[in-house]
Image (tube, helix red, strand yellow):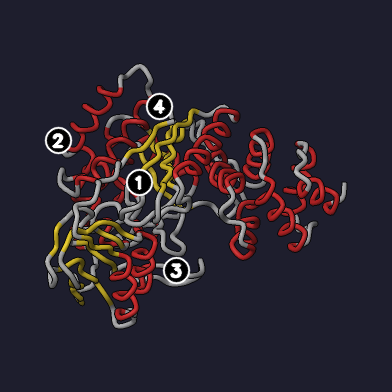
Amino acid sequence: MRMADLIVKKRNGQELSREEIHFIIDGVVHEKIPDYQTSAFLMAVYFQGMNDREITDLTLEMANSGDQFNLSGVDGICVDKHSTGGVGDKTTLIVGPMCAACGVKIAKMSGRGLGFTGGTIDKLESIQGVKTSIPYEQFIRQLNEIGMVISSQTANLAPADKKLYALRDVTGTVESIPLIASSIMSKKLASGADAIVLDVKTGSGALIHNFDDSVKLAEEMVAIGKNAGRKVRAVITDMDNPLGMAIGNALEVKEAVEVLSGRGPADLKEVCMELAVQMLHLSNESLSEEECRRQLSQSLANGSALRLFKRVLKAQGAKENAIESLQISDMIVEVEARESGYVSSFRTDEIGRACSLLGSGRTNKEDTIDQTVGIVLNKKQGDYVKAGDILARFYVSEKSDVAQAESIFQNAVQISKTIPERKKLIYKIL
């Protein structure tokens, strides 16, 4: 086989065989194929796409390119959850404890933030003392004893994905549904969970802005999971608005704790409940969704979800009372509305970028972030504001580019004279 021939084959819209896909992934991982040919292949896929069988084979080859996490030592069904990324998305910190308090084993391997999207591991590491690199023996023991683990991905988990993503990021091929689907699902399959719930974001703050494309991505990922013998469900949720009020690592942890305490923003609570219902239902399909919702609501009302979250943090090294003493910047800048009217819409990705300029995000994976900074919204879509009212509070540091962040934020918030139509939070479940 020659890589040049396979590039031409895909460029011409032809179907690649399983053996040909294996040849490509093996060559990428073992550096037998130069980056310029791999980049050409990615561009061919970007323009010509792949059919379901090709995408499944690509995903399985990527999943098999490194470590396979063995969860056979866990007593019970293990459920994983993945979000395609967004702004203010702290759902893992909420739905995991809710489900684990109801008896579900939550085996969660998470990533770090890049660009305008936040990462669960960054949020978790804003809690003093917490360790996210969990040895395998502790991972299994903690799952059996507590019911939940949140860890960073191992260095050799789906290494083919790391190599392909690094090239996609610099060759304009990130927004390809076959490549996004195989990237996400290769890591989920290698992580070993029995069931997976996918939170597929759609809107201005999502990787995929168009609803129809979001549905297509969700369908591809569900098909991949089922073809690999896993239970998979996808929930398409809104990301035209930041989720909740807090954006930034420690601030988002604080808001997650508020929800686990029975408080918190209504939009965040609604999305978390739907995701948790799907996770609990996948783990035990003899339960009705109504019964799942009742049990999950009880876990918040009786405090069991919050207690379980604290047990997870303690097991992973958190200091005593760590969530009560989160380090949040005491330098606050209030951003005021320039005109009166209704908050009609957000450019959510731009709000995420404004938060990154304060120091909460990365441009490169190696960048250091400031977990104490961020944005807390004071107004949401549909709220009426008068000129001079506070739109948001920026929690900043001396290194924050406040002026640029405020300019981007102001341009990202649209104010109109008429009440906007409120968007759905949950669009579709597949």
* Residue 138 is at least partly visible in this image: no
What amino acid is labelled 3 in the image? Arg
Instruction: Name the secondary structure under disc 3.
Output: loop
Per the image, the residue denoted by label 2 is 302
Marks 3 and 4, how far apart in space? 35 Å
Per the image, the residue denoted by label 1 is 238
Labels 3 and 2: the sequence-earlier one: 2
Q: Are marks 4 and 1 in contact (CB under 8 Å)?
A: no
Q: Is residue 88 above or below residue 372?
A: above
Task: Sort mark 2 into few (<14), some (14-19) or many (20+) by Cα contacts within 10 Å.
Answer: few
Viewer-closest of 364 and 333: 333
Quadrant position of residue 68: top right
Instruction: Name the secondary structure under disc 1.
Output: strand
- Please state if 300 lies on the left or on the right of 192 as rendered: left
Per the image, the residue denoted by label 4 is 282
Marks 3 and 2, how far apart in space? 38 Å
Q: Please state the horizontal and vertical placement of residue 346, each as a whole percent of the image.
A: 31, 59
Labels 4 and 2: the sequence-earlier one: 4
Q: Are marks 4 and 2 in contact (CB under 8 Å)?
A: no
**Which quadrant: the C terminus?**
top left
Q: Are marks 1 and 2 in contact (CB under 8 Å)?
A: no
Mark 1 or 3, closer to the camera: 1
Q: Is residue 228 above or below residue 25?
A: above
* Residue 154 is at least partly visible in this image: yes
What amino acid is labelled 4 in the image? Leu
Labels 3 and 4: the sequence-earlier one: 4
Per the image, the residue denoted by label 3 is 362
Residue at 56%, 36% in the rendered image: 220
Task: Sort mark 3 into few (<14), some (14-19) or many (20+) by Cα contacts within 10 Å.
Answer: many
What amino acid is labelled 2 in the image? Asn
Viewer-closest of 252 and 315: 252
Instruction: Name the secondary structure under disc 4.
Output: helix
